[in-house]
């Protein structure tokens, strides 16, 4: 765009040239500092280079070779559920118990009364042959019913 005979778009070229010259000068000064450091403390420089190489190798091995294990999908062991006669609603209550929720919280989550939750919990205790919540959860985890 021209305004009264002047071009306003070409001002960035000298800035880039001066910036490049400044960067080259800074690099040259840093190179001289590096040469003095390497001459004064060669063992430290070599140790740093070797450590950096092993760090890079470790990061590469960790990221590429070992990688993350694929999460296994949880199926809930339908055979164990069927053999114990656990209903879908009881299974939902069991999952909530495993999550550490109280009867009132489970009732609110599943939109049932607390008495219904107590009935489901009692049925689960009987079916899993347990007398406490922790025992029921442990047996359900051993059977693969809950994660």
Image (tube, grey):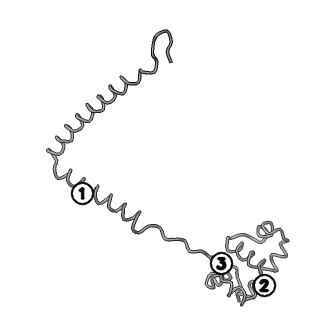
Q: Secondary structure at mark 3?
A: loop
Residue at 39%, 64% (x, y): give it: 62
**Marks 1 and 2 close (CB-CB < 8 Å):** no
Q: Nearer the viewer, mark 1 or mark 2?
A: 1
Residue designated by label 3: 146
**Number of other residues with Cα within 10 Å of mark 2, as a class: few under 14, some 14 to 19, many 20 or more:** some
Residue at 78%, 66% (x, y): give it: 109
Q: Quadrant of residue 14?
A: top left
Left or right of residue 42: residue 104: right
Residue 125 image position (x, y, % from top left): 74, 85
Which of these two is toward me, 82 or 107?
Answer: 82
Residue at 33%, 58% (x, y): give it: 56
Q: Which mark, by number, is residue 50?
A: 1
Outermost residue, left direction? 39
Whole-number angstrom distance, CA of label 3 to CA of label 2: 16 Å
Residue 110 image position (x, y, % from top left): 79, 69
Whole-number angstrom distance, CA of label 1 to CA of label 2: 64 Å
**Marks 3 and 1 close (CB-CB < 8 Å):** no
Say if 30 sits above or below 132 in the image.
above
Q: Which of marks 2 and 1 precedes in the sequence? A: 1
Whole-number angstrom distance, CA of label 3 to CA of label 1: 49 Å
Left or right of residue 16: residue 114: right
Q: Secondary structure at mark 2?
A: helix
Q: Nearer the viewer, mark 3 or mark 2?
A: 3
Q: Which of marks 1 and 3 precedes in the sequence? A: 1
């Amino acid at each position: 765009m021209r305004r009264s005979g002047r071009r306003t778009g070409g001002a960035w070229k000298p800035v880039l040239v001066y910036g490049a010259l400044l960067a080259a000068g800074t690099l040259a000064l840093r190179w001289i500092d590096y040469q003095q450091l390497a001459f004064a403390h060669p063992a430290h420089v070599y140790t740093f280079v070797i450590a950096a190489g092993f760090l890079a190798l470790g990061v590469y091995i960790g990221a590429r070779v070992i990688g993350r294990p694929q999460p296994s999908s949880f199926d809930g062991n339908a055979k164990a559920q069927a053999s114990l006669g656990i209903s879908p609603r009881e299974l939902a209550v069991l999952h909530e118990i495993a999550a550490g929720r109280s009867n009132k919280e489970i009732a609110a989550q599943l939109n049932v009364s607390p008495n219904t939750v107590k009935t489901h919990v009692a049925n689960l205790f009987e079916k899993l042959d347990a007398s406490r919540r922790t025992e029921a959860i442990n047996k359900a985890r051993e059977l693969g019913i809950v994660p």
